[in-house]
Amino acid sequence: MYGLLAVVFFWAVAIYFLRREIAPAWAEPCLRHPVLVFEGDDWGYGPLEQADALRDIAVELARHRDLTGRHPVMTLGVILAGPGAAGTPEEALGAARVTLEDARLEPVCAAMAQGVRAGVFDLQLHGMEHYHPAVLTRAVQMDPQVRVWLAGAPFVETEQLPSPLQSRWTDASVLPSKALDEGDIRARVADEVAMFRQCFGALPEVVVPPTFVWNACVERAWAEQGLAVLVTPGERYETRGTDGLPVDTGVYYRNGQRCASGLLAIVRNDYFEPVRGHRTERGLAGLAAKWAQRRPLLLETHRSNFVGASAQRTESVRAIGDLVSAALHAQPGLRFLTVAELAQHYVRGGDLIDPRLRTRLLALLHRLDRPGRRRKIFGLLAALTMAAAFAALVAAV
Ligand SMILES: [Zn+2]
C-alpha cells in the first residue's frame, strides 16, 4: 500500500517538474495519416542552371502519387534578389542589385511556376536577399573572402558566404551579432513581401526565416504584411554568438501553435541532404519516428544538393524519388500536401487531424520519449511502478 502511494507521489512530482515539456506535447494536435513534405530552401537568385535542376526535380516528383492522387510536394523557399556586377560593394549590393524581375532569371521563375501548376512545387518567402545588404557592405570592408565572393556577381551562390552573414535578420558584421533597428526591419519586410507579390502575382502565405535567425519584431512585421504561416526548427534563434553559431533563446514552437505575432507555427523536423549522404533509410526512419508521434515529416533540403560547386544533381534527384517510392511502400496511407495546406488543417481541425484520446495519449508517450534526462526519469518511474505493482500482487497472494 505504502509502496503504491510512494509511486503515485513520485509520478506526481515527475509530472510537475516536466509540465513544461508535457503541456506543449499534449497541446499539439495529432495527425490521422502520415505526411511527408520536402522543404527546399535557397531557390531564386543565383546560378542560372537552377532552371534545369528545378525541371528535373519536378519531373521526378510528378512520377509519384499518394492514395488521393496528389504528387509529392517540394516547397521552394525563394530568395528574391542578390548582388549585381558593379564597381564598388555598395553599388553591387545596392543600386546594381539583381532581382527575380531580371530577364536573365526568367527561365528560373518559369520553371518554378510550371512546377506549381503541376502540383509539385509551392512557393514560400525565404527573403529578399539571403543576407542583410547593409551588414554585408560592412563585412566586405573587413573580410577579403567576402570581397572575392562579391566580385563574382551577378548570380553568385549565397551558400558560399560565411554562415553568420547568411542570416538576414541580425547584424553579424561583428560577433556576437546585434539586433537590427525596428524601422529597418519593418521597411525591409514590406519590400520583400511586395517584391514576392510583384514576381509571382500573389502574396506569400508561408515564410522561412533565413538560417532560422529572427526575432519577435521581424515576426510581427511578417504578420502585418499578411503572411499566415511561419516555418521554424522548433525554436527561435535571435542572434549569432561569438563562435558565429545561433544562440538559444528558449522560445519554442510546436505545430499548429498560434504565435503572439498572429502567425501559425509549423516545425521542420529533419534533413534530407543527399550530398551529405542522406538516403532512403534515413528518410524512412524519420517518417516512422514522426508518424509514431503523429507529426508530419518536414524534410529540409537545400538547393546546394542540386546546383552549385558541390552539387550532385542526378544522384540527389534520384535519392528524392527513391525515398518517395519507399515511403509510399512503407506507409501506404502517406499523404502529400503543401505546408500552407498542412497549416490549414491545424487551424480548422480538418480531416487530417485525429482528436481521439487513445491516439493523443500514445502520441504523447512517443513525443516525450526522447534521449536524455527525461527518458531516464520516466524509465526509473516505470521500473518503480512495476516493482510496486509486483509487490502488491505478491502481498495479495
Ligand atoms: Zn536559406
Image: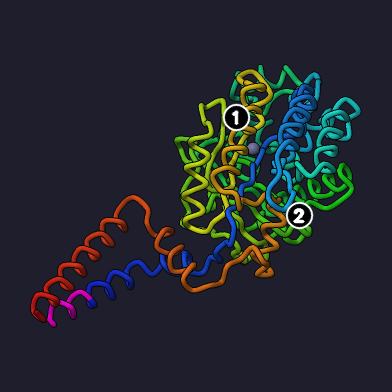
The residues colored magenta run 1-7
**x 62%, y 21%: residue:** 312
Q: Does the magenta stretch include residue 3?
A: yes
Residue 106, horizontal then vertical, whole percent:
88, 30
Q: Mark 1: which amino acid?
A: Ala
Above or below, 82 relative to 256: above
Asked if disc 1 is less than 8 Å from ligand 1, the answer is no
Task: Name the residue carrying label 1.
Answer: 319
**x 21%, y 69%: residue:** 385
**Pointers 2 and 1 in contact (CB under 8 A)?**
no
- Tag count: 2
Disc ID at residue 90: none
For the N terminus, which image quadrant?
A: bottom left
Residue 343, horizontal then vertical, whole percent:
67, 59
Marks 2 and 1, how far apart in space?
29 Å
- Earlier-in-chain disc, 2 versus 1: 2
Q: Mark 2: which amino acid?
A: Glu
Q: Does the magenta stretch include residue 68?
A: no
**Quarter of the displayed picture in which ligand 1 can be seen:** top right
Above or below, 202 relative to 51: below
Residue 359, horizontal then vertical, whole percent:
49, 67
Name the foreground residue: 368 vs 97. Answer: 368
Around disc 2, counting alpha carbons within 10 Å, would you say few (fewer than 14), some (14 to 19), or many (20 or more)? some
As helix, strand or loop, the secondary structure at mark 2 comes to loop
Task: Name the residue carrying label 2.
Answer: 205
Image-quadrant location for residue 57: top right
